[in-house]
Amino acid sequence: MTKVIGLISGTSVDGIDAALVEITGRELDLKIELLAGATYPYPAELREKILALCAGEAVSMAELAEIDDAIAFAFAQAAENIQIGHQPASLIGSHGQTVYHRPPQGSREKGKNSGLGYTLQLGRGALIAHVTGITTVSNFRVADIAIGGHGAPLVPRVDAYLLSHPQEARCIQNIGGIGNVAYIPPRRDNWLEKMRGWDTGPGNSLLDLAVEHLTNGAKTYDENGQLAAIGTPCQPLVEQWLAQDYFQLPPPKSTGRELFGVAYLQQCLQDAEVYQLSAADIMATLTELTAASIVHSYRTFLPQLPDRVLLCGGGSRNLYLKQRLQFLLPSIAVETTDEAGVSADFKEAIAFAVLAYWRQLNIPGNLPSATGAPKEVLLGEINIGHEA
Ligand SMILES: Nc1ncnc2c1ncn2[C@@H]1O[C@H](COP(=O)(O)OP(=O)(O)OP(=O)(O)O)[C@@H](O)[C@H]1O
Ligand SMILES: CC(=O)N[C@H]1[C@@H]2OC[C@@H](O2)[C@@H](O)[C@@H]1O[C@H](C)C(=O)O
């Protein structure tokens, strides 16, 4: 049994999710127990700086170094806090903070750099290992990227072992800033080879930006989808947006705030002008885009629709969004991963604890059918803590 801390701040940049878990087994016999989970918001000033970086604002290398260190210290503090009242952990898996993600483009010849993806997560693991004294695995995405993969999504392989079912085909749908899915066929025959995974597109990123814009900064997210729920989705707009490139691109595929960020929202608002929509209608329409893009991708790219969809991430708390997903998938059970025994709030943090644990055991962490990499690889760089 190994006690591991998983840390991640996702594309919503709302704060650091920390999970303290006990892990046993390897793959098919993998078991986790969540001992503690908490979200530690970033200091407001740091969040603003990170969002500016993500939006492509120019910073000097000196400023970048400062932000990197501030993130690492915040992550180390989260690791210290989550252990309070528990026996100390022996390993940390820290995803860090994505500030830039460029998916690979087209085919790539070995040894040549044309078309290679690029991804940058800040919050260097060496500093977290030094501050906490705990060995820290970090930089999980780069090995998959280096061999031509997207480096994302990485959670599907962990989903496979924690959430597969002997009879049911399941879609594990994360709705964070960006949405991503893991499709898991029933656990029989060569089920792992039949798995699929990809980023479905915007999760909450456009919703958060829109609410902030429409309420002049008074709100940062549409709690439970309350505002969207009193509006009406403008279907012609949803169809217009769904016809765009990303939604038609076959998987494996990944995306980020580089695409579904401020400029994308501005274009959406401009497209909406002709329909003279109310604030609630705009929110309903953007929420419909999130729901419809998820369902469109299942209908277009999966070999069969799943028997059950298990939601996770902050968007699983958006009741209106959940209702719309259920409406668009009438004969399929739409629930959350909580109902299958894995915390919907902390599944990503749990996954990075598992990925660190696998790294120590030399077990590959990527699922080539989800990242597009040509083979399985070990993920993450190991930074030894001085107490190791
Ligand atoms: N009660 C709620 N009602 C509606 N939306 C919510 C609620 N709680 C959280 N959210 C949404 O969830 C978002 C945070 O989700 P989460 O923490 O899963 O994202 P993330 O991990 O940063 O993203 P990603 O998975 O893309 O890396 C918030 O920004 C908000 O939009
Ligand atoms: C580059 C990056 O940070 N991607 C995130 C993001 O947030 C959701 C989606 O886009 C997913 O691809 C990924 O995160 C999760 C943790 C993953 O790798 O599975």
Image (tube, rainbow, N blue to C red):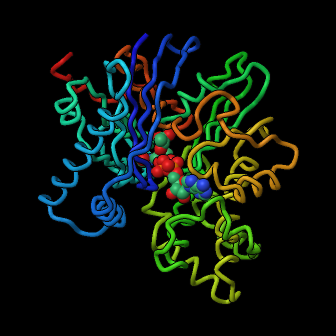
Q: Is residue 114 visible?
A: yes
Q: What is the x, y in percent for residue 359?
A: 36, 21
- Going by the image, does 254 lie left or right of 74? right
Q: What is the x, y in percent for residue 79?
A: 32, 33
Residue 61 or 344: which is nearer the viewer?
A: 344
Q: How many marks?
A: 0
- Going by the image, does 174 lie left or right of 25? right
Residue drawn at the location 60% of the way across and 24% of the way down: 162
Relative to residue 117, is residue 346 depicted above or below? Answer: above
Q: What is the x, y in percent for residue 263?
A: 46, 74
Residue 227 or 369: which is nearer the viewer?
A: 227
Residue drawn at the location 50% of the way across and 64% of the way down: 260
- Going by the image, does 209 lie left or right of 186? left
Residue drawn at the location 67% of the way across and 30% of the way down: 184
Residue drawn at the location 32% of the way across and 61% of the way down: 44
Q: Is residue 203 visible?
A: no
Q: What is the x, y in percent for residue 378?
A: 37, 24
Residue 342 or 59: which is nearer the viewer?
A: 342
Q: Which quarter of the figure is the N terminus placed in?
A: top left
Q: Residue at the front extreme?
A: 85
Q: Which quarter of the figure is the C terminus placed in?
A: top left
Which image quadrant is residue 57 in? bottom left
Relative to residue 124, is residue 378 depicted above or below? Answer: above
Q: Residue at the left extreme?
A: 62
